[in-house]
């Protein structure tokens, strides 16, 4: 993982064949003043998982950059385990679409959709 994902506490992250799964144990430090999981934490969680899913489909000579991220916040989260599942959808020559869901206690918290630009390093 990278420094920022480590900073907010994203734990397990696995990715293979265009799918990824990540976990975060939400703690007091992840909550907003209303006592629910901060929207920025959830956005970071889905962006990290979707980026991993996308990278699992690209070669070593490519970089995936998030160009658009849309999130529907369905219900508030609380302290405890958050799980995100991400999967790559449609792919064009230089653009790829990925979707993700975050769940807690068997309930969906958010649905997310992102577009990634695939950029060649060379």
Image (cartoon, helix red, strand yellow):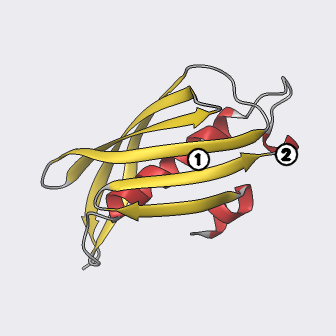
The image shows residue 61, relative to residue 82, as above or below, that is below
What secondary structure is marked by label 1?
helix
* Residue in the image at 29% along x and 78% along y: 60
Residue that lies at the very extreme toward the front in this rendered image: 106
* Residue in the image at 65% along x and 60% along y: 11
Q: How far apart are the alpha carbons under marks 2 and 1? A: 15 Å
The image shows residue 38, relative to residue 23, as above or below, that is above
Residue 28, percent from left and from top: 87, 41
* Residue in the image at 78% along x and 42% along y: 30
Residue 100, percent from left and from top: 43, 39
* Residue in the image at 34% along x and 47% along y: 87
The image shows residue 33, relative to residue 49, as above or below, that is above
What is the number of the mark on residue 44? 1
Q: Is residue 85 left or right of residue 97?
A: right
Q: Earlier in the sequence, mark 2 or mark 1?
A: 2
Q: Is residue 5 left or right of residue 54?
A: right
Q: Quadrant where the N terminus lies?
A: bottom right
**Around disc 2, counting alpha carbons within 10 Å, would you say few (fewer than 14), some (14 to 19), or many (20 or more)?**
few
Where does label 2 land, which residue? Answer: 29
């Amino acid at each position: 993982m990278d420094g920022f994902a480590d900073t907010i506490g994203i734990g397990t992250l696995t990715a293979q064949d265009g799918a990824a799964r990540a976990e975060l144990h939400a703690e007091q430090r992840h909550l907003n003043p209303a006592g629910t999981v901060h929207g920025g934490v959830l956005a970071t969680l889905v962006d990290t998982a979707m980026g991993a899913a996308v990278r699992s489909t690209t070669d070593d000579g490519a970089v995936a950059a998030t160009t658009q991220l849309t999130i529907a916040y369905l219900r508030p989260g609380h302290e405890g385990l958050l799980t995100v599942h991400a999967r790559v959808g449609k792919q064009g020559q230089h653009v790829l679409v990925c979707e993700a869901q975050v769940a807690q206690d068997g309930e969906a918290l958010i649905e997310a959709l992102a577009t990634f630009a695939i950029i060649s390093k060379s």
